[in-house]
Amino acid sequence: MKLPALNNKSERPAELNRREFFKSGAAVASVTLAPGVTLMAFGGEASANADPGKRWGMLIDVNKCSTDCNACVTACSEENGWKLDGNPETDPQWIRKIDLKHKETGREASLPMMCQHCEEPPCVDVCPTGASFKRVDGIVLVDKHICIGCRYCMMACPFKARSFVHEAVEDQKSNAPRGKGTVESCTLCVHRVDKGGTPACVESCSATGNGAMMFGDLNDPNSEIAQALKNYPSMGLRDDLRVNPGIRYTNL
C-alpha cells in the first residue's frame, strides 16, 4: 500500500559534499568485531537485497497486546544480542513496551515501541555522514561503518527509538553487528526479511497466541496487512509530523 507521497526535500550542496566525504572514507574501512561479525557495510548486502517494489511494515492491534507480556522484547533481545542494564537513560531501545492511560476515561493500553521505519525519516535528514539511511523497501538502518556517534539522529527521532552503544559489546550476533560509539535501532530483522522470513518480535507474539503484531508488504494490495489496513481504521504515531510511519497501530 503506497501511502500519500510527501514533497521531497532538496539537499544542500555543502551537505552532499560532506556526506560523500565520509562515504568515500568508509569505502576503504573494514572493521571486524569478532569471528564472523563485521559492521554493516554501506551499500552492501543489506541494501542489495532490498526490493524496490515492496514497502515492509507492521500493524499492531493494541487490544491484543497484554500489559504483562514482553515476549516481543525478549525475542528481539535474543535475536539481536542486546541486553538491558537497568538504566533507562542508556538501555538499548530496539523495542520497548509502553503503558498508556487515558486521562479522562481511564482506559489503559499497552503497546510495543520501536523504530517506526518512516517514509520520511527525520534521522536520515539530520545524519551528517549518511550513516542513517532508508532502503528502497522502506527499512531504515544505520551503517555502522560511517556512524560517528554524533547522536543527531537520536535527537531527531520523535519516538526515542534509537540508542547509543556506550560500552564495548560482547557475544554479538553475526546477523546484528553492534559497535561501541555507534547508534543502533530496530532493523525490522532485515536479515530474516531478506530471506523471506518474519521479524522475531512478530513471530514470538504469534507464538504466545496473542497475535497482536502483523508484518507484511504494504505495497501489495492482496497482502494480509494491506487488507487489514484497508478494512479497519489504524493510525501512525505522531501522524501530525507527516513522516508516514511503516508501523501502524489499531484500536489505540
Image: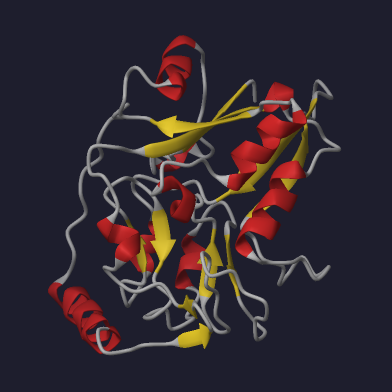
Quadrant assignment, res 102? top right
Q: Residue furthest front?
A: 35
Find residue 13 and report its horizontal and vertical position in percent: 13, 74
Quadrant assignment, res 207? top right
Q: Residue at x 83, y 68 (%)?
A: 86
In front of the other: 168 or 166: 168
* Left or right, residue 152 beside residue 84: left
* Left or right, residue 153 beside residue 103: left
The mark total stands at 0
In front of the other: 46 or 235: 46
Q: Residue at x 31, y 54 (%)?
A: 135
Find residue 213 and report its horizontal and vertical position in percent: 61, 31
Find residue 119 and report its horizontal and vertical position in percent: 34, 44
* Left or right, residue 135 beside residue 209: left
Q: Residue furthest top?
A: 231
Q: Quadrant of the N terminus?
A: top left
Above or below residue 108? Residue 162 is below
* Left or right, residue 248 beside residue 49: right
Residue 96 visible, this angle:
no
Above or below residue 85? Residue 123 is above
Q: Quadrant of the C terminus?
A: top right
The colour scheme of the drawn protein is secondary structure
In front of the other: 105 or 47: 47
Q: Residue at x 59, y 57 (%)?
A: 160
Find residue 56 and report its horizontal and vertical position in percent: 39, 39
Q: Residue at x 46, y 23 (%)?
A: 225
Residue 109 visible, this angle:
yes
Above or below residue 223? Residue 240 is below
